[in-house]
Amino acid sequence: MTITVLVPNEEGRAALAEVDGVTAVRYEPGEPLEDHMREAQVLVPPFLAGPKVAEMFAELPRLRLVQLLSAGAENWIGLVPRGVALSTCRGAHGGATAEWVFATLLSIYRELEPFAANRARRVWDQHYTETLMDKRVLVVGAGDLGEQLRRRFAAFDAHTTLVGTRARDGVHGVEELPELLPEHEVTVLVVPLTSATRGMVDAKFLAAMPDGAVLVNAARGPVVRTGALLDELNAGRLRAALDVTDPEPLPEDHPLWSAPNLVLTPHVGGSVTGGQVRAWHVAAAEIGKFAAGLRPDNLVDGEY
């Protein structure tokens, strides 16, 4: 039996060309489906597509799987029809996002932005800076990205503690955060956005971090309460690196634009050359398992 998979671009057709039992058919997002497309059992939305794509569900009576090209699934929870599975692209973007974490931490500790400002003013200010070496790093989120970070921090001679939803070998449980936060100079957020993580980084969470600590958000903006973080940044007690914000994108008059002690990027952690190739590699493997009657590895269960 061959299943039809709707893909949004030619990269998708190429990635699925060698997958047994699959016929990839390209569709144009936002345009009406042709009759032969309506028999599709699998739909792949464009990368970071909005909920408007969900309007297609009514035209796909045989739909059984929605395969995402992103690792996050929060925009799709509650939109996918009953009886239709949802699979993420976990494993495709972790390496690139880990690079962003290191880029921003090294920028903060080695003062790259202040040195760039000095260059613009032709000021030669030679002095000692901090270093990532020997820093104690708390990584909140123990999935693919958490493991990617732990491996890379070891290469920088930093010490990593992983925190997951439950304690297990090599991973602390989330209930231990109040005791762990004061012991780490860096806290990196790589959790999915769920009802449990929305707003988890509040004033109490931030107050538990030691003076001069760095908060790195590579997760989703609403995981952090923006007002509480702004209070700490403006007071000069904490520093931060944000690739995601709440709201997002930032309005032109938002105080985060001018907040001190902050490195800010516009949700580009996973946006790198080759990223879509890696995403389609994971998606093809997930769809191949589905076509073979097996359970895909990245199926969403509940909120994640």
Image (cartoon, rainbow, N blue to C red):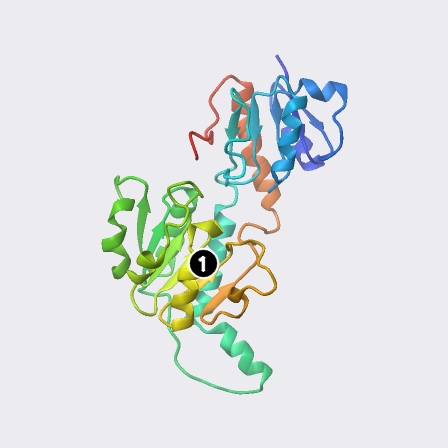
Classify the position of the C terminus by image quarter.
top left
Under circle 1, the secondary element is helix
- Residue 279 horizontal/vertical position (percent): 57, 39
Q: Residue at x 47, y 63 (%)?
A: 104
Q: Residue at x 68, y 17 (%)?
A: 39
Q: Is residue 60 left or right of residue 177?
A: right
Amino acid at the residue labelled 1: Thr
Q: Residue furthest left?
A: 179
154 above or below 197? below
44 above or below 108? above
Residue situated in front as seen by the camera: 98 or 40: 40
Q: Is residue 20 left or right of residue 171?
A: right
87 above or below 202? above
Q: Residue furthest top?
A: 1
- Residue 282 horizontal/vertical position (percent): 54, 35
Q: Is residue 291 left or right of residue 216?
A: right
Q: Residue at x 43, y 46 (%)?
A: 145
Question: Disc 1 marks which residue?
Answer: 226
Mark 1 crowd level (few <14, some 14–19, many ≥20, 10 Å Cα) = some
Q: Is residue 173 visible?
A: no
- Residue 38 horizontal/vertical position (percent): 70, 20
Classify the position of the N terminus by image quarter.
top right
